[in-house]
């Protein structure tokens, strides 16, 4: 039979004192002595002290909150009057409700500032300087929509439709925000471009960037490459779970580095750096796994996500082949992944390129 832990009498007296005199909860006492709540309750019951009911607990909690407010009232007044803190800032600092802050200030006969008066305080100017992103467009020097004249429709159409300027750039011309420009377009019933239409004809931001010059591409260290060659590198898993495509891509990478060493340096896939982007005439795509040196792409098409996308996948493949001439795209699914050998695929690809 399991014997009960013997608690020293000194500890028992301390627990009783904290619970009865200082009105602490069992949860707070538990954290002090590192006991379980059941053990605390048993100690109290053995000394004829029983757990408080919900009414008693609520009453004690209310008294504690009241004491906290009483002790901080002078400081609250000082921060509002002398330091010129806003009610919003006081609310967050003391973790109290707006109405409680206002009631406490009125009880001390403090005249509350208007929003305009608050904006003229030194505290507000310091906040505006350090937290520029949180200020309104008016404070950033932008003219608010209700204080700017609506421009002629022909002028807006020339900027937006003919010159194809963005609402943000049009807003900069008039000294207002892009939100105001959108409201003007809606007032004149000028059709707003979709994201695809806005991006059409634009040069992709990543065009011309290499592995060395790309700002966000993670460079593989020599130590990491050595671990991959020896099969010691464990790829990262999100929340302890790995997707089938993720495991597949890491397996391909390990096989490539163990067999070909540093022959292929420009390898791209989502978990290693990023999925290789391809811009086509209609839109842009991202390939699951891409080896740039031999222009080889490998796509993992899971049965679930691609079950009703056969036509879309074929169209996507044609567009990528048109944008990257000479590319070879290999599609793999759950049925073919077991027999897939990346070494044979690369050797066959190299042989194809040499025979051309």
Image (spheres, rainbow, N blue to C red):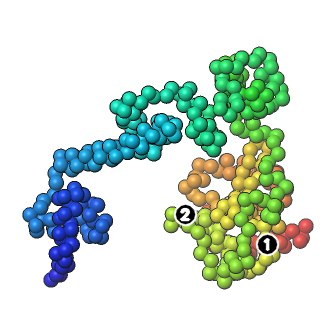
Location of the C terminus (image quadrant)? bottom right
Measured in 3D between alpha carbons, the distance from the residue under mark 1 to the one under mark 2, in whole angstroms, is 27 Å
Q: Quadrant of residue 178?
A: top right
Q: Position of residue 351 (x, y in %)?
A: 84, 73
Q: Please name the residue shown 29% across and 46% down the image.
A: 67
Q: Quadrant of residue 32?
A: bottom left
The kind of secondary structure element at disc 1 is loop
Q: Position of residue 203 (x, y in %)?
A: 82, 45
The foreground one among 332 and 155 is: 155
User: Could you tell me if residue 255 is visible in this image?
Assistant: no
- How busy is the neighbourhood of tag 1: few (under 14 within 10 Å), some, or many (20 plus)? few
Question: On screen, 101 above or below 116?
Answer: below
* Residue to which mark 2 is pinned: 238
Q: Please name the residue shown 49% across and 28% down the image.
A: 113
Location of the N terminus (image quadrant)? bottom left
Q: Position of residue 224 (x, y in %)?
A: 68, 76
Q: Please name the residue shown 57% across and 65% down the image.
A: 244
Question: On screen, 21 above or below 309?
Answer: below
Among all residues in the image, which is located at the extreme left? 48
Q: Quadrant of residue 277?
A: bottom right
Query: Viewer-nearest of labels 1 and 2?
Result: 2
Q: Position of residue 175 (x, y in %)?
A: 75, 27
Of the two numbered discs 1 and 2 on the same chain, state the one appearing first in sequence: 2
* Residue to which mark 1 is pinned: 264
The foreground one among 158 and 84 is: 84
The foreground one among 90 and 179 is: 90
Q: Please name the residue shown 68% across and 34% down the image.
A: 140
The kind of secondary structure element at disc 2 is loop
């Amino acid at each position: 039979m399991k014997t009960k832990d013997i608690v020293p009498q000194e500890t028992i007296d301390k627990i009783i004192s904290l619970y009865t005199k200082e009105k602490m909860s069992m949860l707070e006492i538990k954290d002090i002595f590192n006991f379980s709540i059941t053990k605390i309750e048993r100690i109290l019951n053995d000394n004829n002290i029983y757990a408080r009911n919900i009414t008693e607990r609520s009453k004690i909690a209310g008294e504690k909150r009241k004491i906290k407010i009483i002790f901080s009232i002078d400081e609250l007044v000082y921060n509002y009057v002398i330091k010129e803190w806003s009610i919003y800032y006081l609310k967050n600092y003391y973790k109290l409700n707006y109405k409680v802050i206002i009631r406490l200030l009125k009880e001390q006969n403090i005249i509350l500032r208007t929003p305009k008066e608050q904006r003229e305080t030194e505290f507000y100017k310091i906040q505006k300087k350090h937290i520029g992103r949180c200020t309104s467009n008016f404070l950033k020097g932008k003219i608010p929509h209700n204080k700017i004249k609506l421009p002629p429709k022909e002028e807006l159409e020339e900027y937006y439709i003919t010159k194809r300027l963005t609402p943000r750039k049009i807003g900069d011309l008039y000294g207002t925000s892009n939100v105001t420009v959108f409201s003007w377009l809606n007032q004149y019933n000028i059709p707003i471009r979709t994201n695809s239409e806005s991006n059409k004809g634009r040069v992709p931001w990543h065009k011309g960037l290499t592995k060395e010059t790309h700002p966000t591409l993670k460079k593989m260290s020599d130590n990491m490459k050595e671990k991959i060659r020896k099969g010691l590198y464990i790829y990262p898993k999100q929340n302890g779970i790995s997707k089938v495509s993720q495991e597949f891509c890491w397996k391909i990478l390990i096989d490539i580095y163990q067999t070909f060493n540093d022959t292929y340096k420009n390898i791209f896939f989502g978990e290693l750096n990023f999925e290789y982007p391809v811009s086509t005439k209609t839109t842009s795509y991202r390939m699951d796994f891409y080896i740039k040196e031999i222009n080889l792409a490998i796509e993992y098409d899971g049965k679930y996500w691609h079950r009703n996308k056969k036509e879309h996948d074929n169209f996507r493949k044609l567009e990528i082949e048109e944008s990257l001439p000479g590319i070879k795209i290999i599609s793999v699914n759950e049925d073919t992944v077991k027999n897939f050998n990346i070494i044979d695929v690369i050797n066959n690809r190299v042989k194809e390129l040499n025979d051309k």
